[in-house]
Image (cartoon, grey):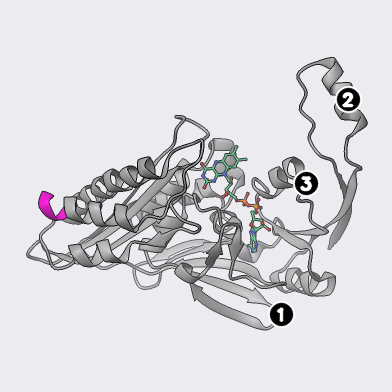
């Protein structure tokens, strides 16, 4: 295992030479942190256990490094997953569903034929994160472990019933992704634990899903509301199962269970879809900020819920 010492400084932005000089004078002292690059999962967990609290796992680094540079959230040490080959699997089978290793890039998930066919909402969510550069570097694991309320892969994983596979000092455990998010930037991971993979169960026949988000800017912006819907239809066309998950309108991404209950057992006609959208908007718990008012976000949830249900139904009818 390699261990390097990295020195992290805070990024200083300035508008003029005078500003730059003034800012340089108050530039925060550089802080060093150790960089561990274990070759196996067991080694990674051993490093975390030995070094203790204050360290962070790093996958793509697209959240971690930005937070270290711009918010001064410099970890005491980092444990890189880059050389942990056992975390790089992305596999699908009709019997077992989809397994996404913690090192798998968002771009690989978005482009995988089985993901596009069986988990369309997830393919869309992964393809919306940042830019091509971010998607080639960032991971689904990092997206969920960062636990932003607006994380674009979270609502798709919630509607598909995904499970987080975790390894830590006490061995392995699995928890539903619905229980993984505990607050903004907080997860159920405890000190020393690593997210190993995300497992998404195989979906029943006549199932479709969709994800849509709204961003104030067209590119490189995060959602102010995001909705994923997954629909399974009975042979007669009625809704057998419905899952709706909302992002960026609460402290964590979450399922809109009252809206789901309203749709199940009904034909997916416009009256039902409208009513489900209205109920989902009522379940949203958005804040108002400079990017959008709470009322605007609720209205977005209503519209996006209707759109994603329509798209999921169309897909379920086609398969
Ligand atoms: C310019 C830009 C645009 C962005 N746009 C979007 C966007 O549109 N939508 C969106 O959802 N996100 C966006 N992001 C955020 C980020 O790119 C994603 O959240 C990405 O998926 C993070 O993955 P990563 O592998 O880079 O995570 P990292 O930065 O490596 O890690 C993120 C966090 O998760 C922890 N972590 C990572 N992997 C594990 C693991 N296996 N076990 C335990 N802890 C782990 C880290 O310790 C850290 O706290 C953007 C970021 C940037 C810089």
Residue 35 sits above or below residue 234 on the image: above
Q: Is residue 241 magenta?
A: no
Residue at x 33% of width, y 58% of height:
283
* Circles 2, 1 touching at the beta carbon (< 8 Å): no
Q: CA distance from mark 3 to mark 1?
A: 28 Å
Residue at x 19% of width, y 49% of height:
314
In this view, the mark in front (2 or 1): 2
Residue 56 placement, left or right of 290: right
Secondary structure character of the magenta stretch overall: helix
Q: Which mark is residue 22?
A: 2
Q: Which residues are magenta?
A: 269-273
Q: Which mark is residue 169?
A: 1
| Label 1: few (<14), some (14–19) or many (≥20) C-alpha neighbours in 10 Å | some
| Label 2: few (<14), some (14–19) or many (≥20) C-alpha neighbours in 10 Å | few
* Viewer-nearest residue: 220 or 148: 148
Q: Secondary structure at mark 3?
A: loop
Q: Which mark is residue 72?
A: 3
* Circles 3, 1 touching at the beta carbon (< 8 Å): no
- The mark that comes first in sequence, 2 or 1, is 2
Q: Is residue 272 magenta?
A: yes
Residue at x 73% of width, y 60% of height:
56
Q: Quadrant of the C terminus?
A: bottom left
């Amino acid at each position: 295992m390699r261990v390097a010492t990295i020195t992290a400084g805070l990024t200083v932005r300035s508008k003029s030479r005078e500003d730059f000089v003034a800012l340089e004078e108050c530039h925060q002292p550089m802080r060093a942190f150790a960089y561990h690059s274990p070759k196996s999962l067991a080694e990674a967990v051993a490093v975390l256990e030995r070094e203790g609290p204050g360290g962070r796992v790093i996958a793509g680094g697209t959240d971690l490094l930005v937070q270290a540079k711009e918010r001064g959230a410099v970890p005491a040490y980092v444990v890189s997953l880059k050389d942990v080959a056992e975390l790089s699997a992305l596999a699908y089978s009709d019997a077992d569903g989809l397994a996404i290793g913690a090192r798998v890039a968002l771009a690989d998930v978005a482009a995988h034929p089985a993901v596009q066919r069986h988990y369309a909402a997830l393919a869309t969510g992964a393809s919306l994160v940042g830019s091509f550069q971010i998607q080639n570097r960032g991971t689904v694991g990092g997206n969920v472990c960062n636990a932003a309320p607006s994380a674009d892969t979270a609502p798709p994983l919630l509607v598909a019933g995904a499970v987080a596979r975790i390894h830590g000092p006490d061995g392995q455990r699995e928890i539903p992704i619905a229980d993984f998010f505990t607050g903004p930037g907080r997860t159920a991971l405890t000190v020393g634990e690593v997210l190993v993979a995300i497992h998404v169960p195989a979906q029943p026949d006549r199932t479709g899903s969709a994800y849509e988000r709204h961003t104030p800017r067209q590119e490189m912006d995060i959602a102010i509301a995001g909705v994923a819907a997954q629909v399974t239809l009975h042979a007669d066309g009625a809704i057998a199962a419905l899952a709706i998950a909302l992002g960026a309108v609460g402290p964590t991404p979450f399922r809109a269970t009252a809206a789901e209950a309203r749709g199940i057992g009904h034909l997916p006609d416009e009256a039902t879809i409208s009513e489900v959208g209205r109920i989902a908007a009522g379940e949203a718990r958005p804040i108002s900020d400079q990017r959008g008012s709470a009322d605007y976000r609720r209205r977005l949830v209503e519209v996006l819920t209707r759109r994603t249900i329509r798209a999921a139904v169309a897909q379920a009818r086609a398969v």
